[in-house]
Image (cartoon, rainbow, N blue to C red):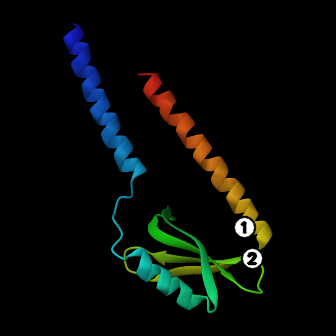
Amino acid sequence: MSRMNGLAAAALVALLATGTASAATPSHHPKVSMKKARATALARVPGGSVKSSELEHEKGKLVYSFDIAVAGKTGIDEVLVNAMNGKVISVKHETPAAENQEKIQEKAEPAKEPAKEPAKTGTH
């Protein structure tokens, strides 16, 4: 009986690991380098400098997100570049208030996700 429980537990761990890995990692690897996407983004915001960048899923697409600041201009310009084909998806200006709100939301989201994972594995 304990051997059967061990096999069932191993199978469950394998299933959870497979499901967790596919949900946690991007479904595709980027075809465009961060360096090339960065150059594309900077070309859309003349005189800008990249303050932060990341590879993320947004609206169902794998994208590079660049926050670009321009000296003498308040806020930042957020440029999204498709990580699969290198095309600019959007350029959006964010005021300092909107930028702060986005940071607050980003901090709140990761705190929710880890709380869910242990609950799933702890109940099995």
Question: Dot 2, how many residues are within 10 Å of its Cα: few (below 14), some (14-19), or many (20+)?
Answer: some
Number of numbered discs on residues: 2
Residue 29 screen position, x and y as percent: 33, 65
Left or right: where 35 falls relative to 13:
right
Query: Label 2: which residue?
Result: 75
Task: For mark 1, give the secondary structure.
Answer: helix
Give the vertical position of 111 relative to 66 (above or below).
above
Residue drawn at point x = 56 percent, y = 35 percent: 115
Image quadrant holding the C terminus, namely top left
Q: Quadrant of the N terminus?
A: top left
SS under mark 2: loop
36 relative position to 78: left or right: left
Contact (Cβ within 8 Å) of mark 1 with mark 2: yes
* Residue occupying image coordinates x 26% and y 14%: 5
Tell me the amino acid under the disc marked 2. Answer: Gly
Q: Quadrant of residue 8?
A: top left
Identify the residue at horizontal 69%, vertical 59% (top origin). 103
User: What amino acid is at disc 1?
Assistant: Glu
- CA separation, marks 1 and 2? 7 Å
How packed mark 1 is, by other alpha carbons closer than 10 Å (few <14, some 14-19, many 20 or more), is some
Please report the residue visible at 35 percent of the width from the left and 46 percent of the height from the top: 21
Q: Which mark is residue 99?
A: 1
Percent of width and height locating residue 122: 46, 23
The correct choice, above or below, for 97 with respect to 50 in the image is above
> Is 77 left or right of 64, judged from the image as shown?
right
Residue 60 percent coordinates (x, y): 46, 64
- Picture coordinates of residue 71, whole percent (x, y): 73, 86
